[in-house]
Amino acid sequence: MKTNLAEFIKSTPEGREADSILRTCVHCGFCTATCPTYQLLGDELDSPRGRIYLMKEVLEGNAVTAKTQMHLDRCLTCRACETTCPSGVQYGRLVDIGRNIVDRQVGRPLLESIMRAALRIVLPRPALFKPLLKAGQFMRPLLPGALKKKIPKTGASNTEWPAPRHARRMLVLDGCVQPSLAPDINPATARVLDRLGISLIKAETAVCCGAVTFHLNRQNEALDYMRRNIDAWWPHVEAGVEAVVMTASGCGTMVKEYGHLLARDPQYADKAARITELSKDISEVIFAEREALEASLGSSLVPRPSSLVPASAAKPRVAFHSPCSLQHGLQIRDTVEALLTSAGFELTMVADSHLCCGSAGTYSILQPQLSQRLLKNKVAALESGEPAMLATANIGCLTHIQSGTSLPVRHWVNILDERLS
Ligand code: SF4
Ligand code: SF4
């Protein structure tokens, strides 16, 4: 695609990056086939190709309107289009740059600005989020059905964390909302890794990965979260941790970008690049240790006599929802599925598994109608194989899907931990 960027952006690092991304797009339109918003709305401007065209207009200095902003807001940043694109267009980076410029030029109505500020202030801070969640859970029985569904219950959980005892050590990101919504995910991860000969440790001063703030277009503020995490992790990196483990794939996608986003910060560039290298989704870590896992499973699984129980009946049926951040953002596919299968679960078929569930960070709050339509489709696809439970790999997807189904929705690592115990 030919471009002629406007003076205000052309010589900036963002302008140069956006220009090179725009030039890789050949306008073939293959990406429209896998774009969830184009499938729902059928409007070219709600497709990747249409949005790329809108951003080109913005970057070339043409008038920006609230309509441009609406089409960019409707994008889930699911990056399914990146997986499909034969030309390797980095749509996710382009839309980050484009949204930032559009928001600066168009602004937002007061109520919308307040809502976005509230999300930006509350979600990354467990000290604010946790008491608000508790208050919501207390009021839950009194709330109307639609609102009630939005407030997840937090059940009893096993938060026992094994004491570090192995020479091999890895760090884990605690995250912002996950410890309040599902406090058992990271302890379960620590128990699984402990069995595989790895001690999982936390850096107590680490904070939110920065994704919530970044995707609400406060990108400089988000860079500060990233710097704080690097400062918290660095002593452990110097002490030789093998990886920084992510148990929420949404956070993992953000941390993988630290190196790129801080590349122009002379104080943090090298450290950020190292953190990007060390950042690993928990599925990658466990998959690399699969021999040790299979040995543990062999000793912990109690085989049932096949004469008494049919083989298929002995296998719990699970439908796995692969989050967009896992399959499109991190490009990790079939890994969790392989691990669950080797742990003795039967995975049911899920149609259109490449499509987003509608959670997408704060999308479910800011675009509720589209989000609910995607949720309904996703739950129907997940339930179609009659599983006994649903599993996923990201806290946002977990709570969102749980609001649309009566089946239990778990992080897959909890299921694996219980299998090992
Ligand atoms: S983003 Fe990729 S798939 Fe979509 S129109 Fe451009 S080149 Fe084609
Ligand atoms: S990121 Fe997702 S919603 Fe946005 S244009 Fe690409 S496929 Fe469509």
Image: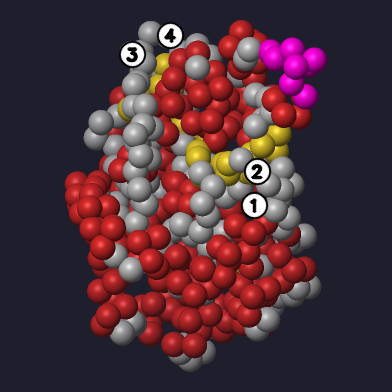
Q: Is residue 334 left or right of residue 325?
A: right
Q: Is residue 162 left or right of residue 133?
A: right
Question: Which region shows up in magenta?
Answer: 303-310
**Distance Cα–Cα, label 4 vs label 1:** 40 Å
Residue at the image point whose x is 51% and y is 59% from the top = 404
Q: Is residue 93 visible?
A: no
Horizontal and vertical percent position of residue 378: 61, 59
Horizontal and vertical percent position of residue 337: 67, 36
Q: Is residue 30 visible?
A: yes
Residue at the image point whose x is 61% and y is 40% from the top = 388
Q: Disc 1 vs disc 2: Cβ atoms closer than 8 Å?
A: yes
Residue linked to disc 4: 167
**Distance Cα–Cα, label 2 vs label 3:** 35 Å
Q: Disc 1 vs disc 3: Cβ atoms closer than 8 Å?
A: no
Residue linked to disc 3: 163
Horizontal and vertical percent position of residue 411: 50, 38
Residue linked to disc 1: 382
* Looking at the image, residue 305 lies above or below residue 1: above
